[in-house]
Amino acid sequence: MSASPQSTPGDLPFYEAARKIYPREIDGRFSSLRKAAVVALLGLFYGLPWLSLDSHQALLFDLPARKFHIFGLTLWPQDFLYLAILLILAALTLFFFTALAGRLWCGYACPQTVWTELFTWIEQWTEGTRGKRMKLDRGPWTLEKVFRKTLKQVLWIGLATYTGYTFVAYFVPIRQLSDQLWHLSLGPAATFWLFLYSLATYGNAGFLREQVCKYMCPYARFQSAMFDRSTLIIAYDQQRGEPRGARRRGVAARAQGLGDCVDCTLCVQVCPTGIDIRKGLQYECIACGACIDACDQVMDRLGSSRGLIRYTTEDTERGFAVRIVRPRTMVYAALLLGLSGYLAYSLTTRMPLIVDVIRDRNALYREVQGTQIENTYALKVINLDHGAHAYQLTASGIDGLRVAEPAEAFQTPAGSVSNVVVRLRAPADRATGVRRITIAVEAIDQRSIHVTENTRFIGPTS
Amino acid sequence: MPGVYIIPPARRFVRMDVGIVLWTSFLAACLASLLFFAAVDPLLLRDAGPAAFRHIDREEGYALGFVFFWVIGSSASALTLLLLRMPPPGAERPKSGTP
């Protein structure tokens, strides 16, 4: 038993050492689509903080003030429900499109993919094509190698720093941020986040790359739960391709006993995660379509039809029709529609005013002038609107109930809280025992903004 | 042989394990901070807490909360990893020094 197999693994490395992947540059339908996605998404990311609305930054998550500005909408901690719904909607959208079209997110929209693409462009520009990069890495440290590697690092670090700066600009107004950076007076929190996000961009897009997808990404692990037989996947047509191999020109492949795959391995060379799609669907495949582009080019050159590697579904391969309408997609679609409908409805009918009524705890009631009973309340009025408003109070529930204080309308600035002491008076003969009353708060400049709150009015027991 | 554990019980923590523990708890801490601080203002916690924390501002409050959630999360992750690595009942201890 001394040589039992379970006593040895401790001496072996537990994880396979990662080998560096040199993805080959590729043009084609799906690569163009990804390039378009990179330009659009990164354009949005880098551009949005510069957008202004009413002389304010249009998109700003102001954490120190606990306010989120989203294109004219200001969300307060009280509006947390909206934020939660937005996050759930984002997750549902991801699930819906995954069920429908597979790893669409991974291949075209994920920040990891998008920034890796950008960093790879820089790498290709400074170090050259796949072959040149491999040769450069193998070769000695010549002056040219030092120059190319330095240039790449300078560009990478510059881009990563600008990315970190843009990221912080979603939380600190970008003009203020630029000013502080220029005068080197950036606070510790902003500095920390700027460097952390720069470092994360540099590390993830420059070095870790496909390892983030393979080892770190939780979505990559559970996306298969959204898959079924009608989900779009990338597959190699084994029937058509095998047996693979080089062939003589001028003679039909079938006559030579060969399939359509010429075993050029271009599909492996272009793969950003370094897999061989001909081995079947693998969890490392991010469905970017680079292998399809590569194979289509080869098939075009050979005069064969495209699609030896293609987007397909398990159902198609088995000869069934693809069902877009199926329980899985319908459930996701229904949840999406329902939730976004609710969000739209509650946002349009959202009242930009919150009123809290608290009865004074010190005294139940007070007799005034012998004929009146007075109750005191603390009112918390939160103005969630963009402009200041003057509010007026009214009270009802007892005949003759009136507001003794505040006697006039009170102002509450935009996005502020007013604490108002309210004294209500009612005739002593009517205000006996505990009665339910209603306090209404209304903006006098905009009658549609009004809130009513129920509370109690206490008088002497008769 | 079915049912044989091939994970050696006494294996040292490797770099990758540390990475996984810190990464999963980082994600959890992000979510926890988001949910927690959406509902609770750090300044309220400060006023209710011990005097040593009296002069922190909101941003420092967020940072402290995040670190707190990260430490709790990574402790749980590390403990889970450790317990999963315990030898199963009746497992033979690998002898050290055997080839």
Image: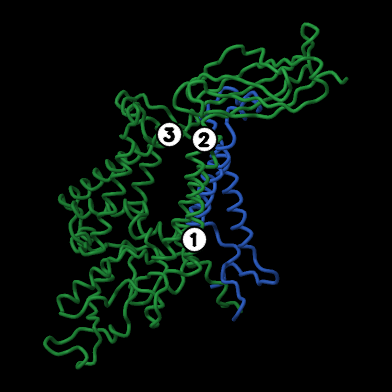
Chain colours: A green, B blue
The residue under the point 71% across, 27% down is: A455
Q: Residue furthest right?
A: A462
Q: Chain of mark 3?
A: A
Q: Residue furthest front?
A: A399
Label 3: which secondary element = strand
Q: Which mark is residue B63?
A: 2
- Which quadrant of the view contains residue A172? top left
- Which quadrant of the view contains residue A417? top right
The residue under the point 30% across, 66% down is: A289
Question: Counting residues from the N terminus, which is met first, the one under dot 1 or under dot 3?
Answer: 3
The quarter of the rendered structure image containing the C terminus of chain A is top right
Quickly name the residue at label 1. Answer: A332
Q: Which mark is residue A69?
A: 3
A434 vs A18, nearest the viewer = A434
Residue A21 in the image: above or below residue A403: below
Report, in whole angstroms, how far the alpha carbon at label 1 lies from the one at label 3.
29 Å
Q: Chain of mark 1?
A: A
Q: Position of residue A232 (x, y in %)?
A: 38, 69
Q: Is residue B26 left or right of residue A47?
A: right
The residue under the point 58% across, 27% down is: B43
